[in-house]
Each structure stands twice: as C-alpha cells, then as structure tokens.
Amino acid sequence: MRPKVLSAKSCSSFSLSRAAGTAQLKLLADGNPTIEKSGAPVDLQGARSGDPSAWEKIFRRYGKTVSATVRSFRLQEADALDAVQTTWLRLAENVDQIQNQERLGAWLTTTARRECLRMVVRATRVSHLN
C-alpha cells in the first residue's frame, strides 16, 4: 500500500509552527496532564476535509494524551518533540483510514508509543556502532 501524499491544503491546515512547538514543550513539561473526556466524538470528517477548527479540536482533546505518552519514555527533549510531531503527522497522513472515531485516542497513544520505540531502537543501534 502506498502512503498517502499530503496536499498543500492539508499541510497548511495543520502545520506545526514554532508556536505549536512551544505549546508542545509546555505540554511535555506539564507534570499533571489532564485528558479532556467529552462524550461527543471528534469531527474526523472535518479533519479529512482540512477544516482547521476540526484539527484544533482534535489537538486540544488529545494533545496532552500524546505528550504524556511520549513523556513516559523519558526521551531527550528534541527526540520527545520529534515523536510528538511525528505522531500528529501520522494522523494527518492516515486520517482517511481511521474508521472508528471513538478509538482515535487509542490510535494516537499507540502511534506515539511506536514512534518512541523507533527512536529508542535507533539510539540503541547508534550507541552499539560507537
């Protein structure tokens, strides 16, 4: 299966700018993350169509969950930010493939965990080469 190519529209509607990086640092530094538990499902259809407000709602609802998952791996700050950003990039790449909106939190948590594990494996390989 070929990976989905992101369009300029989808990238511009969900870009991780410097301000977003700063917000991620704040989320990573937060010692007591809270997870918004709303009964209403998130608007994946809006995210699929590139609606910035839908992406913002998803980020607000699950941002601390992703950050807490990454933080649990105790990566260096730059690696942690990379893992968080890559998790959100994976969502942007795969938003069309997510079928159950209620499972988005679990999908993001699993994706963040896998990104962290990739970084740990990569760091282990590099340290064995030295």
Image (cartoon, rainbow, N blue to C red):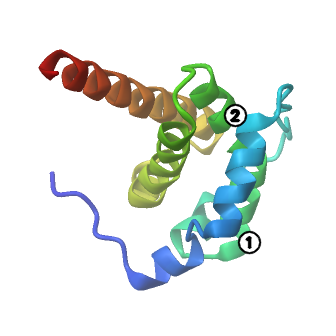
Relative to residue 10, is residue 30 depicted above or below?
above
Residue at the spot of label 2: 65
Question: Which residue lies at the image location 51% right of the left edge and 43% below the top edge?
Answer: 78
Q: How crowded is mark 2: few (under 14 residues within 10 Å), some or many (20 or more)?
A: many
The answer to whether residue 5 is left or right of residue 105 is: left
Q: How many marks?
A: 2
Percent position of residue 68, x then y: 68, 29
Q: How crowded is mark 1: few (under 14 residues within 10 Å), some or many (20 or more)?
A: some
Relative to residue 124, is residue 48 depicted above or below?
below
Image quadrant in which you'd find residue 33: top right
Q: First in sequence: mark 2 or mark 1? A: 1
Percent position of residue 90, x then y: 42, 50
Q: Which of marks 2 and 1 is in front?
A: 2
Residue at the spot of label 1: 53
Callout 1: SS: helix
Callout 2: SS: helix
Question: Which residue lies at the image location 47% right of the left edge and 83% below the top edge?
Answer: 9
Question: Which residue lies at the image location 47% right of the left edge and 75% below the top edge?
Answer: 11
Q: How far apart are marks 2 and 1 (CA)?
A: 19 Å
Percent position of residue 115, x then y: 41, 34
Depth check: 84 or 108 in front? 84
Q: What quarter of the picture does the C terminus occupy?
A: top left
Relative to residue 105, is residue 58 depicted above or below?
below
Is there CB contact under 8 Å for labels 2 and 1? no
